[in-house]
Image (cartoon, rainbow, N blue to C red):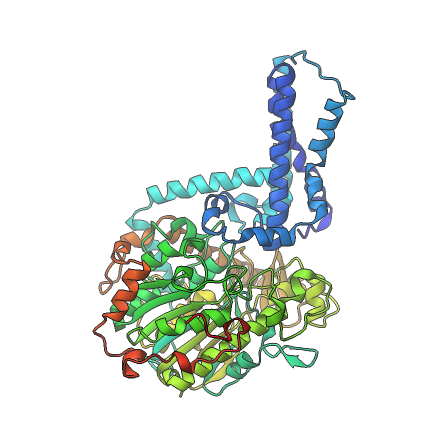
Amino acid sequence: MGAVGPMQNFLLLINPLPAGMLLLGIGLFFKGRKSYWIIIIIDLLLSIWLFANILYYREFSNFLSLSIIKTSGSTADNLGKSIVGITKPSDFLAFIDVLIVVILLATKLIKIDIRPLKLKVTSLIEVLALSFMGFNLLMAQHDRSGLLTRTFDNNYIVKYLGMNEYAIYDGFKTAQTSAQMAKANVSDIKSVRKYLKANYVKPNPEYTGVAKGKNVLVIHLESFQQFLIGYKWKGKEVTPNLNKIYHAKDTISFDNFFNQVGQGKTSDAEMMLENSLYGLQSGSAMSSYGTSNTFESAPAILSQKAGYTTAVMHGGAGSFWNRNNAYKSFGYQYFMPLSYYVNKPDYYIGYGLKDKIFFDQSIKYIEKLPQPFYLKMITVTNHYPYQIDKKNQTISKTDTNDETVDGYVQTAHYLDQAIGELMKWMHKTGLDKNTLIMFYGDHYGISGNHHKASAQLLKKESFNDFDNLQFQRVPLMFHMKGLKGKIDPTYGGEIDVLPTLLNLLGIKNQDTIQFGHDLLSKDAPQLVAQRNGDFITPEYAKVSGSYYYTKTGKKIVDPDKKLRTKLSSLSNQVTTQLSLSDRVIDGNLLRFYKPVWFEKVKPSDYDYNKEVALKKLDSSSNKTSLWYKNHKKTTQSKFKTDAPELKNKSAK
């Protein structure tokens, strides 16, 4: 958890005690054997809570929140395999105290005393616990001012106050959010608009409309980090196809582009991609608000302003991250999840169809889409726990001895091969000539809990929290025939994708509620906020409350007044931006504002039933689809795959 200094370590040591006293003390108010049973049950529940957080933190570097628990049904697809993969035998020590107490009572080494304690004694224990908790809070506030009012990182709350106190805090914040939505009114959106107007950045006119009228194909690169571009293992390129695209003369690539996700991971990336709004501080915005909130999203904007057909294709469950509801709120006309695809035991891995099989089966849907289309394809094979069957392994594992990390190059290599097959099909059909293809990585693949292995992969002697912030780079590439390409060093993040894309398409967005900026603008602010309040710029970075020089990685110690003011200003800008974005989502503020040209999305207008959707595609009078241009013949035979599962093309 990165405890630094004697105070943080001391508080981390003592903060479980007051909550333990308070909760276990409840059992003392009961009489006889009932008191023992209640204390054991409370102890067991606390152990389960600890155990669950151990597993969750190991994978996500964060703690369980009420929002995550409430929406767990939308993210539960195949989680069992992931849980088994990250569980260690030592984790079960969380239950050792319960086991010992039960054994001691069962063997009568501790004799049950049925005499009731006096009320003043039990009350005194609870008062002492609350006093101890208050003392803990005072010490924490003294060491970190504004702990509960300004922090965006749950690690700090647990580190200073404890995991159970964090649960209380999170419950309070969740209730507060519900109240905020009830209280929100039109004046709240005015303050957001005022901020956006004051911070508006004019798009780069050189690139305005260069892709006007083109199809847009968004390839969602699951868990794909920037370091994989150009990375070799045992002399073999891990991602040769993406490397070629990255360096192509007609590709705009960004080498300082960062993921900005929080607990919502992939859903946060999608929220930023489609809306230029940040994910939430706690939980997933798509899961919590995707069904009920009003949005002014990319698919609706493109459909209304430029007549685009909008669709998402994903070889996973439609309910994952509440996509089957959120996409309707975003204005997607079509959503084709796993139920649209042939699924066999060896087709599916982890969280969905293997990417090669997914692309192969998607051809029949892509070719039917009326053009221009805005299509997002979500890959899944390069997803934790980075395992793929032997027949699909075409590169050896790395040798860090970290089971989570070593398979990463194998699944990334498989994803790259799948991309290569899709690109060849697009070239053969000519679809690449009128399509802007956007590749983006949604979030990290290797979390901050693997410093040693990360250092080995990058051939570094050490790997600290600053290095981990640098490790949050993910790819962003815009590829199109005739596009004036370059590798752009501008610092930016996922919040900036939509404004950049809209400018390339020649669609004005000055009157929309978007927190990002055109990355190609010469005035781009280059301040990249992280969901926990950290940030990075070309000059400075903030990580876990400490500041660094970006170029050297050297920690800033005793900055002068001018630099302190600068760093404080950057930090405040990040806090303001995150807070205002949260206000938009938490308060559902877009219900109070829309551009004059925008028609509010009605989720009830969309039906993702397979039979209904395919009938609509087949009966479309639009003569712009690839299928129609190919004389109403399929282009499926032009898609070639080496997927061993499809040797006989049985999926057709």
Q: Is residue 498 left or right of residue 132?
A: left
The answer to which of 496 and 389 lies nearer the viewer is 389
Residue at figure coordinates x 39%, y 74% from the top left: 363
The answer to which of 274 and 128 lies nearer the viewer is 274
x and y percent of residue 540 in the render? 59, 67
x and y percent of residue 613 in the render? 29, 63
Quarter occupied by residue 118:
top right
Q: Is residue 498 left or right of residue 397?
A: left
Residue 112 lies, with reference to residue 347, above or below; the image says above
Residue 265 lies, with reference to residue 49, above or below; the image says below
- Residue that sits furthest to the left in the current view: 621
Q: Is residue 255 left or right of residue 449?
A: left
Quarter occupied by residue 142:
top right
x and y percent of residue 557 in the render? 68, 61
x and y percent of residue 595 in the render? 26, 62
Q: How many marks?
A: 0
Quarter occupied by residue 618:
bottom left
